[in-house]
Amino acid sequence: MSPKHTSYDVVVIGGAMIGSAIAWWLARDPDFDGRVLVVERDPSFEFASTSHTNSCIRQQFGVAINIAISQFGVAFIRDFRGFMQDETAPEIRLDGFGYLYLAADPAKADRLRAAQALQASMGAGTRLLSPGQLAAAFPFLETGDVLLGSHNPGDEGCFDGGTMFSELRRRARRLGVEEVTAEVTGLTRSGDRITHVTLSDGSSVACGDVVNAAGPAAAKIAAMAGLALPVEPRRRFTFVFEAETPLPRTLPLTIDPSGVHVRSDGALYMAGCPPEHDGPADPRDFRMDHEIWEDRVWPALAARIPAFERIRLRNSWTGHYAYNTLDQNALLGPHPQVPNLMFANGFSGHGLQQAPAVGRGIAEQIIHRGWRSLDLSPLSVGRVLTGTPLTETAVI
């Protein structure tokens, strides 16, 4: 189905979590009365990063702006009905079991100390745990090789991202946002502006602003405007398993020094890891590396938690990170060379938890031409041109 109009004030490319958040924040703002078109190639979202996410949120980052973004994300989750201005809106569940980082070498332990100091200075409840404290708090963990742990027991954990996504998308449509099923095949650039967006059905719409919210395909969209973007799809594996002997308490999302992470998932457990050779992938490549479960994941789980020697794999899938190769942080806002082309890309696995703050910020850029509620300028896409990374080391 072609768009209803030949021109739109804003065209959002990508209708998953980030695109839907941007569209909703735009449509709800009383200072905005324009037309918004969201272009999504797959309305089932079967292969979207949003659909394959583990749906978690944390404040244990090493960069201040990421901590602030997640703090707003928690506030948004906790007061979802208030933000929707609708007491009939669903509550968004947040299971606050926390994240638990384990360091087994001095350099990583030093990074945990530095990150904890930053997090604490911003009000996060992160605490450092010695091997003895870890053993007391989590007696099922093998801590013989661990030098230090970092755990935030509040405002971190798993939330109902699926409900949040569906509500934002539905409410954006209710507020007048138009969705069309199509693929963007071209951007027409005239000087420093994008004037038209061409769709796979052959239609072309004029635009005021364009938002690149294309997830792992972000670089492809940027290239249509003659711009380079250091974002590539990278495969990530998720495994859901059952333990013959369940643990005596909820397992925080535990990041093992091996690179494997694991957490409670109701009565089951969820683990994940990158492939052995972590490089760019075809955006249509959702192959599962079945050997990695037997060769890497299960051995790491059993070594860290001996009770996990007897487990049964129940499900597995492959998703994609939209991986920013510059510094593993989001690339946000207007491009210096094309100011009406907005970027919301390169989240490197953090997109779902950062969507509330990013959606609000991009909407503010479009409406007010600046960051208002939260200064997201440290994540400006302009750092690609200057080659100035803002590196986030706490990437899982």
Image (spheres, rainbow, N blue to C red):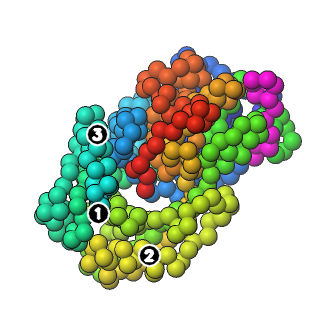
Task: Point out the tag, 1 or 3, that comes first from the N-terminus.
Answer: 1
Q: Is the C terminus in the top left, top right, bottom left or bottom right quadrant? A: bottom left
The residue sitting at the front extreme is 106
Mark 2 — residue? 296
Residue 119's tag is 3
Q: Secondary structure at mark 2?
A: helix
**Vertical placement of residue 8 versus 236, above or below:** above
> Do the CB atoms of the residues marked 2 and 3 lie less than 8 Å apart?
no
Instruction: State the count of labels.
Output: 3
* Residue 181 visible (yes or no): no
Task: Point out the tag, 1 or 2, that comes first from the N-terminus.
Answer: 1
Percent x, y of residue 376 = 47, 29
Spatial CA distance of label 1 from label 2 is: 18 Å
Residue type indicated by callout 2: Arg
Percent x, y of residue 134 = 18, 61
Residue at the image point whose x is 75% and y is 46% from the top: 183
The part of the image, by quadrant, that contains residue 186 is top right
Residue type indicated by callout 3: Gln
Residue 104's tag is 1
Q: Nearer the viewer, residue 393 or 193?
A: 393
**Vertical placement of residue 339 versus 49, above or below:** above
Magenta span of residues: 177-195
Percent x, y of residue 394 = 39, 50
Percent x, y of residue 278 = 55, 63
Q: Would residue 18 appear left or right of 255 to someone viewing this image?
A: right
SS assignment for the magenta stretch, majority = strand
Residue at the image point whose x is 37% and y is 35% from the top: 64
Q: Is the N terminus in the top left, top right, bottom left or bottom right quadrant? A: top right
> Do the CB atoms of the residues marked 1 and 2 lie less than 8 Å apart?
no
Q: Nearer the viewer, residue 100 or 244?
A: 100
Spatial CA distance of label 2 from label 3 is: 32 Å
